[in-house]
Image (tube, grey):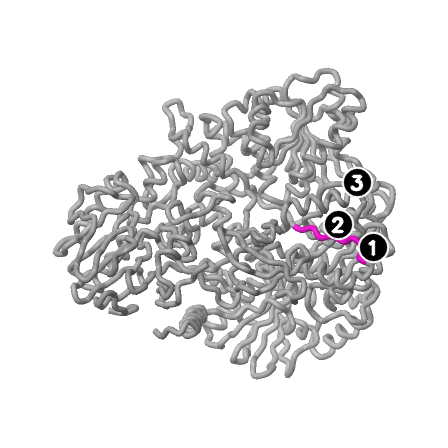
């Protein structure tokens, strides 16, 4: 599998260009913050009517990753649905699509702050998934190590000879990995923010995703 | 004016300083003298907030002197909310406001009551509004108000313009019965080009070589305004002006990126006659009368004649005295443009690009504003919209598309059904589904686009004083210790905190060049044509001998560009092969030509490496010689390139962002509200990419394309030029660089071609950062 290879607490992992994480030893694919139904929720609250293609686009990319990685376990690391009602309002063809992806694989929904409860949708619903030596959870804890988390939608800024670029990224230090948001319409939080700067150790790396993967020291204030 | 004050609309054209604003108010004062206090009688609309406040001051004078009991109030974005509420409950006789505040006012349910008794509306500086979406929005709002107050009479006040009829049509309600009053233009201006030209540089735009001459002029005059075309140039010039200002004459700087308080301080000092000179930009093009100004200096060419006339008018803001102005060409080529501009001013030949049909994104916003004020019938609204000068050619189909967009998003593949924004009621009226959305729509009103800027502040321990704003993109290039210019001071970048750039003062340091976002104007068609005409007639009158020698040399080794043909030059230099395109279509279009032609060269594997564009020419360089450059200019190929490739370009995304924000597809970032991960707004780039992928024919994509044709991409000018020259493309294959192309080699703003280059740059930068940090991959 092509990607940025590294170890965390002894586990060999691969960060993929798409923003997914692959654990070859367990054939486990992990994605975070899909925010399915975000457009619907925005609308429901009287907000603007964004192009309603985001669920389709997110599932397309997820399907591509599942097929190319041949993963047997899929972990959705929380905020998979923009809220519980958004989960319920997915259209039939979208639900069928998810069921098709689930067939023959073990599928785990980790709860997030946006979707803090079980949904009437196949797969296992958990708060935390421990697979030693790693722990999968939505919001990172402060004191654990070997942690795989999401929640923050980190993005890193880079200045290229006067040109200014900002890309979603993984954040990695010796204790934890933070995944970028996988959903199509998801904004980002700059790594310079207080939340991320205080969470990550000083030697942390930002692994920029996109057409190519590039690791840089995490940009800080 | 008084005689015709009963007409439904009329237009008054007068040069700045002729007292036209007061003339506009005179009928109102007469009518109000008899019966004031009966609610809103007159609405005054100006493009500038500051102007509204200034007019209030000027208007209170005669009102108080005559002992009239007339209430005059202003209402802008700066007005306190309790005052605004009170104004809605009990409107004054005369309300002074801006197009945005007026649009907001029409969005309230009580709009019918507020405007019921309205008699007159005065639109000031209508020529400035006419050219922008703000004007289209204003006319839509007025069509709305006209429905509520059928007796409403309109008055437009305009500076001298190229086509008064067009503005009269724009102002009036279709009936085309708008009398135009043209005031005497007063004595012709006393205007000349700076005579000292020995050390005139070959390229660049700053005019630094003329610092001492400008200082001499300041000494000779009471108060001088020094206009620049960009904020960065103003800053650099100001810095050097002060270094040479040995007598320490009071000289200030004024531009749109400076902190508001600082600007107000400069304006007040100016009114009190405390300043000898102000270095400024377009921020002082319009506005407050400063009688003491007796000289205007324009640094660099004004790019269009209208702007030059407007700026000249800032000197001697008195009706009967000639305005005095000096133009300082910034480089050798500009002497030609300056002479052409002076000639145009003398002949009163003003440039005017004709205005296209009213933009649909503004119409979408208008439909939502109307929905906020209450349910509406689509037929009535359509008729109302068509009654405006901006939208008189709107088709029912276009209107229905906009309405559909506002109702359900107008998506081809999947409609919103459950959560429509507007719902069609059984009585045939459209209404907001969710009343909460009214609040969001109101927050989004307006057509002015804010660029992403960051506040610049002194560090907290140094007082934390706010200095102004810089573009986010510029801030991103700064690292701790870098110095730049703002408000004439050299400051040192310390840190970026809470969306604020913290700096310290470093007067001892040399500044890194400041780049602000500010607008870069493209030279107008009129000026370009005048220059080509001079080349054709070999008319060198008014030009310095150095320039004439240079042009003669060009005409003997190659050719001069001519009207009716397109001149191309190819020549080798320093292992690179060059192509120079003398399109004379203005900076934006020349830039687009650079993008499109290099793309063609890449397709032909000719290894283009980069290009640079000015208002007249594009210079492209690459690895291989171009034998047949004429074949690169097939209009079909260029249009194809535009369709299939330019759509991915950053310019398109920027145009889309503006269109999507105005039409309410994405919400404006309210300044001051910080983005955090959880409330992150939708990235317009991602929405654009999604639409391109799944719904390329969506209304927003079509509006974006139309927009790009004239705005940043300006393909319309390229098309016009190619159609005009037809097969008349002249190719000069030279053995070396030509005199006319030489300055292009010194021009700043070279654009490297970034096929896979960006990815390579990221990888390089990443490697450098990692090794700097002592890490290896």
The residue indicated by pointer 1 is B191
- The residue that disc 3 covers is B17
Outermost residue on the front side: it is B461
Looking at the rendered structure, whether the residues under marks 3 and 2 are on a common chain is answered as yes
- The residue closer to the viewer here, B1 or B733, is B1
What mark, if any, has residue B432 been given in the picture?
none
Instruction: Give the CA distance from mark 1 to mark 2.
Output: 11 Å
Q: Check the residue under mark 1 and report the chain it is in.
A: B
Q: Marks 3 and 2, how far apart in space?
A: 12 Å
Q: Quadrant of residue B245?
A: bottom right
Circles 1 and 3 in contact, beta carbons < 8 Å: no
Tag 1, which secondary structure?
strand
Q: Is residue B674 visible?
A: yes
Locate residue A81, reporting x and y percent: 27, 45
Q: Nearer the viewer, residue B484 or B41?
A: B484
Judge whether B673 appears above or below B650 on screen: above
Crowding at label 2, few (<14), some or many (≥20) Cα neighbours within 10 Å? many
- Dot 2 corresponds to which residue? B311
Segment tinted magenta in the rendering = B248-255
């Amino acid at each position: 599998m092509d990607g940025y290879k590294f170890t965390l607490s002894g586990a060999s992992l691969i960060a993929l260009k798409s923003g997914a994480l692959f654990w070859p030893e367990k054939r486990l694919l992990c994605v975070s913050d899909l925010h399915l139904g975000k457009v619907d929720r925005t609308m429901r609250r009287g907000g603007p009517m964004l192009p309603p293609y985001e669920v389709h686009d997110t599932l397309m990319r997820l399907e591509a990753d599942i097929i190319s990685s041949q993963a047997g376990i899929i972990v959705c690391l929380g905020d998979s649905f923009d809220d519980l009602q958004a989960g319920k309002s997915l259209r039939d063809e979208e639900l069928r699509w998810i069921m098709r992806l689930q067939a023959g694989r073990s599928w785990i929904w980790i709860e997030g702050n946006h979707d803090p409860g079980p949904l009437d949708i196949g797969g296992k619903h958990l708060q935390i998934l421990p697979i030693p030596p790693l722990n999968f959870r939505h919001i990172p804890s402060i004191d654990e190590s070997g942690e795989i988390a999401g929640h923050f939608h980190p993005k890193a800024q880079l200045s290229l000879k006067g040109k200014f670029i900002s890309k979603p990224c993984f954040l990695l230090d010796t204790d934890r990995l933070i995944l970028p948001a996988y959903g199509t319409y998801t904004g980002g939080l700059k790594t310079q923010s207080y939340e991320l700067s205080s969470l990550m150790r000083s030697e942390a790396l930002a692994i920029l995703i996109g057409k190519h993967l590039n690791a840089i020291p995490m940009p800080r204030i | 004016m008084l005689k015709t004050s009963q007409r439904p609309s009329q237009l008054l054209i007068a040069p700045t300083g002729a007292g036209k604003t007061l003339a506009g108010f005179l009928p109102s004062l007469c009518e109000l003298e008899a019966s004031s206090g009966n609610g809103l009688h007159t609405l005054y609309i100006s493009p500038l907030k500051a102007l509204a406040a200034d007019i209030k001051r000027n208007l209170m004078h005669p009102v108080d002197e005559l002992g009239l009991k007339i209430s005059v109030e202003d209402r802008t974005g700066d007005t306190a909310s309790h005052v605004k509420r009170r104004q809605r409950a009990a409107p004054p006789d005369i309300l002074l406001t801006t197009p945005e505040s007026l649009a907001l006012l029409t969005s309230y349910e009580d709009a019918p009551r507020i405007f019921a008794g309205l008699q007159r509306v005065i639109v000031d500086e209508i020529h400035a509004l006419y050219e922008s979406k703000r004007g289209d929005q204003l006319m839509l709002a007025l069509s709305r108000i006209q429905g509520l107050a059928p007796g409403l009479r309109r008055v437009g006040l305009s500076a001298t313009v190229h086509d008064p009829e067009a503005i009269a049509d724009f102002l009036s309600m279709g009936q085309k019965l708008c009398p135009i009053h043209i005031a005497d233009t007063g004595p012709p201006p006393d205007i000349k080009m700076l005579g000292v030209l020995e050390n005139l540089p070959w390229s660049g735009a700053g005019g630094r070589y003329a610092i001492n001459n400008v200082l001499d002029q300041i000494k000779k005059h009471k108060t001088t305004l020094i206009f620049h075309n960009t904020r960065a140039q103003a800053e650099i010039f100001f810095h050097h002006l002060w270094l040479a200002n040995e007598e320490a004459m009071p000289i200030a700087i004024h531009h749109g990126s400076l902190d508001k308080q600082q600007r107000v301080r400069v304006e007040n000092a100016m009114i009190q006659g405390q300043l000898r000179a102000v270095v400024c930009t377009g921020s002082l093009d319009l506005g407050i009368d400063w009688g003491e100004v007796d000289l205007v200096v324009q640094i660099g060419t004004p790019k269009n004649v209208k702007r030059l006339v407007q700026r000249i008018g800032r000197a001697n803001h008195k009706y009967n005295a000639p305005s005095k102005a000096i133009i300082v060409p910034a480089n050798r080529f500009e002497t030609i443009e300056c002479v052409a501009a002076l000639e145009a001013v003398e002949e009163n030949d003003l440039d005017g690009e004709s205005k296209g049909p009213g933009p649909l994104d503004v119409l979408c916003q208008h439909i939502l504003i109307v929905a906020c004020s209450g349910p509406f019938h689509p037929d009535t609204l359509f008729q109302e919209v068509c009654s405006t000068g901006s939208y008189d050619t709107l088709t029912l189909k276009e209107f229905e598309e906009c309405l559909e967009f506002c109702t359900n998003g107008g998506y081809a593949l999947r409609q919103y059904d459950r959560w429509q924004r507007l719902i069609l009621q059984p009585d045939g009226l459209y209404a907001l589904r969710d009343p909460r959305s009214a609040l969001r729509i109101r927050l989004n009103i307006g057509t002015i686009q804010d660029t992403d800027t960051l506040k610049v502040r002194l560090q907290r321990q140094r007082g934390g004083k706010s200095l102004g704003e810089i573009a986010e993109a510029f801030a991103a290039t700064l690292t701790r210790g870098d110095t730049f210019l703002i408000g004439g001071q050299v400051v040192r970048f310390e840190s970026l905190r809470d969306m604020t750039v913290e700096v310290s003062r470093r007067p001892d340091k040399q500044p890194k060049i400041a780049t602000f976002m500010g607008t870069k104007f493209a030279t107008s068609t009129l000026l370009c044509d005048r220059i080509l005409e001079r080349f054709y007639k070999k008319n060198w009158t008014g030009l310095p001998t150095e320039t004439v020698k240079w042009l003669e040399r060009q005409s003997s080794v190659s050719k001069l560009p001519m009207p009716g043909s397109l001149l191309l030059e190819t020549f080798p230099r320093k292992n690179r092969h060059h192509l120079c395109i003398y399109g004379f279509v203005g900076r934006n279009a020349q830039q687009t030509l650079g993008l499109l032609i290099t793309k063609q060269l890449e397709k032909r594997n000719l290894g283009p490496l980069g290009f640079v564009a000015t208002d007249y020419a594009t210079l492209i360089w690459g690895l291989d010689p171009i034998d047949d450059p004429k074949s690169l200019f097939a209009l079909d190929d260029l249009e194809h390139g535009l369709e299939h490739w330019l759509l991915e370009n950053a310019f398109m995304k920027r145009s889309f962002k503006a269109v999507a924000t105005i039409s309410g597809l994405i919400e404006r970032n309210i300044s001051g509200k910080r983005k955090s991960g959880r409330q992150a707004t939708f990235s317009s780039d991602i929405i654009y990419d999604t639409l391109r992928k799944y719904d390329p024919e969506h209304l927003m994509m079509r509006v974006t394309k139309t927009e790009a044709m004239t705005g940043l991409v300006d393909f319309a000018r390229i098309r016009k030029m190619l159609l005009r020259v037809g097969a008349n493309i002249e190719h000069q294959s030279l053995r070396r660089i030509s005199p006319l192309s030489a300055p292009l080699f010194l021009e700043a703003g070279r654009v490297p071609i970034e096929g896979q280059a960006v990815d390579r740059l990221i990888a390089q930068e990443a490697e450098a950062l990692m090794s700097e940090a002592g890490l290896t991959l």
